[in-house]
Image (cartoon, grey):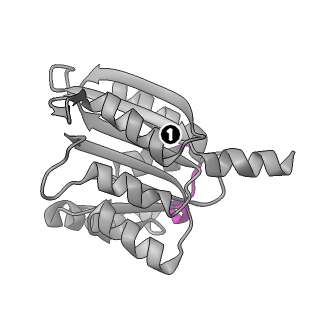
Amino acid sequence: KEKYIQREEFAKICQNIHGKILILDQILCCTNFLMDKGIPGNKIIVVEKNEQNYRNMMEIKNEYRKFQDVNINYCSIGTYLSKAKKSRELLHAIWFDYYCTFRGNKECRPRKDIKLSKSLNPSYIMVTISQRWLYRGKKGRDALEEHIGELFPDHQNIYKKRYKGGSEGKGNAMYCTLHQTSSLLNSLAEQA
């Protein structure tokens, strides 16, 4: 239920932007949802660092014509963001849909990835993290919100929700937050 609500919130903002959308998506569930909401596949960039999940998505892409224009990449979100920064690719919305804590691990570095996204000047960022452990003495969600506030000082929070993860809501405590960044707010002010 909560994942559906999150996808709905993300889809709403994606319907109103004209640029590229970067997401973490293991089996094209979120991609399918966004496309069902009218977002064309050629606007969606999917990253997956797990080789088997990547292969599965490529099989789905090759089997179903609907996904033929989706850009699927075998790499971490941090690696993709680094490449996008070097090539000056414009990303208008990014969903960091992590299942790790804010402090991350060897393979997943939420704090570093979100910081790297700032250089790409996205209009929206959405982050999902586990709330299992503290980060530098703070709850993960508080550390995350503080980090976003430091990187995007003029941001506007659109959505935030704490919930229980897992298929039956019995898993880890999770937190999801969606922010409109200062880049979009500044461009709207310039248009006025």
Q: Is residue 181 above or below residue 47?
A: above
Q: Residue furthest bottom?
A: 87
Residue 88 coordinates in the image, percent (x, y):
53, 75
Front residue (pair 185, 174): 185
Q: Is residue 157 above or below residue 13?
A: above
Q: Quadrant of residue 65?
A: bottom left
Residue 124 coordinates in the image, percent (x, y):
54, 46
- Whether residue 42 appears in magenta in the rendering, the answer is yes
- Whether residue 31 appears in magenta in the rendering, the answer is no
Q: Is residue 115 left or right of residue 172?
A: right
Q: Which corner quadrant holds the C terminus?
A: top right
Q: Is residue 167 left or right of residue 6?
A: left
Q: Is residue 135 above or below residue 171?
A: below
Q: Quadrant of residue 58?
A: bottom left
**Residue for badge 1:** 10
Front residue (pair 176, 65): 176
Q: Residues within 10 Å of mark 1 (few under 14, many from 20)?
A: many
**One can see residue 136 in this view:** yes
Q: Residue furthest right?
A: 192
Residue at 15% x, 29% y is: 132
Q: Which corner quadrant holds the N terminus?
A: top left
Residues rendered magenta in the picture = 37-43
Front residue (pair 109, 170): 109
